[in-house]
Image: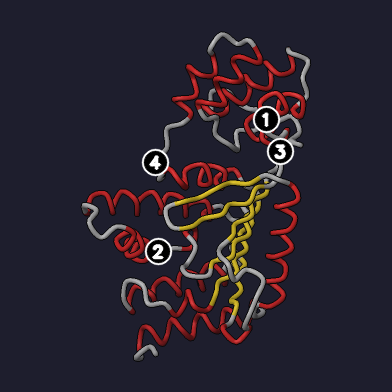
Amino acid sequence: MAGPKDLDPSSSPRALLGAELRHAREQAGLSQDELGAKLFVSGSFIGQLEAATRRMMPEIAAMLDEVLNTGGFFKRNCKAAAKSKYEEHFEEAAEAEAEATAIRQYSPLLIPGLLQTPGYARAVNRVYDPTTPEETVEKWTEGRMVRTRLLDHPTKPLFWAVLDEAALRRETGGREVMAEALRHIADLTRRSRVIVQVLPLSAGAHAAMQGALKLMEFADAPPLVFFEGVRIGRLEDDPATVAQLRFTFDLLVASALSREKSLALIEELAQDYAYEEHP
């Protein structure tokens, strides 16, 4: 369960809602678990709303107003907190990502968004919907580049990625784009800003063959896991599910190349893309 977090209500609409929710809950004499039970959600979910790591959706806001007798406050104000520059299926995860103290991610098919270059992101966004106007693709690409600024901080958040070798060998955007993308990952790794390991094709069967996963930890809220598929995404806070997928990530780390061998492979592939015909 999330511990109390002193939010600055002026810092964002979500921080305001989180601070007001905690105040209203405490005034009602309810714990996070007790309030969650009345709304048919977990106490962890209430804690994440209060810590501003999750967005308050209109249906939840309406129930909170009813249970806490807040006269429609949350329903009136949750619209401002719901504004996002991200696509609907990813917006909640992107906002949680920005608050995370640690992010652990396995990516089987493409370079994770936080590690992407503009050229790579543009290529991914273009194939996402080939009929989308160019200005929309640029808007999506800009939004992804905004996310990468999380790594501008010298130490926070901890970002640990296990990349499938298949993602590095899938030529996305052309050889020049791939060379730039892999050099960028190598640079972040050499500057000790990220931890990157490659899960080689030679590893064979592994614990996450059914898809990608992203685990996020927070200073004042329970951890989350994000599942993403084609045009869909879901955040999960169930402790047992999060613990099981943390174990899955640990298994992937155990099967992956060491950090040193991973960096060597990434740089070798970057050279191949830049100067040789890539197989």
Q: State the residue position of label 4.
A: 85
Q: Mark 2 or mark 4, which has the lower sequence index?
A: 4
| Amino acid beneath label 1 | Phe
Q: Secondary structure beneath disc 1? A: loop
Q: Mark 1 or mark 2, which has the lower sequence index?
A: 1
Q: Which of these two is toward me, 179 or 140?
A: 140
Q: CA distance from mark 3 to mark 2?
A: 31 Å
Q: Nearer the viewer, mark 1 or mark 2?
A: 1
For residue 215, the mark is none
Q: CA distance from mark 3 to mark 1?
A: 22 Å
Across and down, in percent, residue 138 comes to 28, 53
| Amino acid beneath label 3 | Asp
Q: State the residue position of label 1.
A: 40
Q: Quadrant of the C terminus?
A: bottom left
Q: Nearer the viewer, mark 3 or mark 1?
A: 1
Q: State the residue position of label 2.
A: 117
Q: CA distance from mark 1 to mark 2?
A: 41 Å
Q: Which of these two is toward me, 77 or 103?
A: 77
Left or right: 62 in relation to 19? left
Q: CA distance from mark 2 to mark 4?
A: 19 Å
Q: State the residue position of label 3.
A: 220
Across and down, in percent, residue 91 comes to 47, 43
Task: Report if the CB atoms under discs 3 and 1 are less than 8 Å apart.
Answer: no
Left or right: 100 in relation to 31? left
Q: Secondary structure beneath disc 3? A: loop
Residue at x 38%, y 83% (from the top left corner): 273
Q: Quadrant of residue 270?
A: bottom left
Residue at x 70%, y 23% (from the top left corner): 38
Q: Secondary structure beneath disc 4? A: loop
Task: Report if the CB atoms under discs 4 and 1 are less than 8 Å apart.
Answer: no
Across and down, in percent, residue 35 comes to 72, 24
